[in-house]
């Protein structure tokens, strides 16, 4: 039997990012509930906001210039645990207004 992955979300308590971390955890669980062993919230400090899948850093607020959209983090998780899986509407590319005007 394959071992299921663990997601850990480190969030800065000084910055009050707990609700943001809880929201993204909910989004991850909604999409990957059968594929993950757990999604953990890990309090931290110093402006830290990171999302790890086992020992793989999926998102770092400082390096990735902000916070992830649910769509982006779901795609990064899927790309590691099941690259062939369709995420439905989360796989639909976003078309900007400028792109629409060029058509």
Image: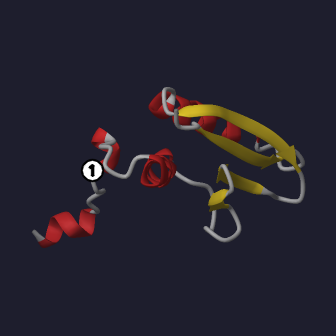
Residue 67 x, y percent position in the rendering: 62, 55
Report the side of 89 relative to 25 (left or right): left
Residue reaching furthest to the front:
1
Q: Nearer the viewer, residue 10 or 102?
A: 10
Report the side of 2 relative to 49 (left or right): left
* Number of marks present in the image shown: 1
Q: Give the color scheme: rainbow, by chain, secondary structure or one colour.
A: secondary structure
Q: Nearer the viewer, residue 37 or 41?
A: 37
Residue 99 x, y percent position in the rendering: 21, 68
User: Badge 1 local density, few (<14 within 10 Å), some, or many (20+)?
Assistant: few
Report the side of 102 relative to 93 (left or right): left
Residue 16 x, y percent position in the rendering: 82, 43
Residue reaching furthest to the left:
103
Report the side of 52 relative to 32 (left or right): right
Secondary structure state at the residue bearing disc 1? loop
Residue 50 sits above or below residue 18 on the image:
below
Residue at the (25%, 69%) spot, across then down: 98
Residue at the (45%, 33%) spot, across then down: 31
Residue at the (78%, 47%) spot, across then down: 11
Residue at the (68%, 62%) spot, across then down: 61
Rendered image quadrant of residue 42: top right
Residue 10 sits above or below residue 37 on the image:
below
Identify the residue under disc 1. 92
Q: Quadrant of the C terminus?
A: bottom left
């Amino acid at each position: 039997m394959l071992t299921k992955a663990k997601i850990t979300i480190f969030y800065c308590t000084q910055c009050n990012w707990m609700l943001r971390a809880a929201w993204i955890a909910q989004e991850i669980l909604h999409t990957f509930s059968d594929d993950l062993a757990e999604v953990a919230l890990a309090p931290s400090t110093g402006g830290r906001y990171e999302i790890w899948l086992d020992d793989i850093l999926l998102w770092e607020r400082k390096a990735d210039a902000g916070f992830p959209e649910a769509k982006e983090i779901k795609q990064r998780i899927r790309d590691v645990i099941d690259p062939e899986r369709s995420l439905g509407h989360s796989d639909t590319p976003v078309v900007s207004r400028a792109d629409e005007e060029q058509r």
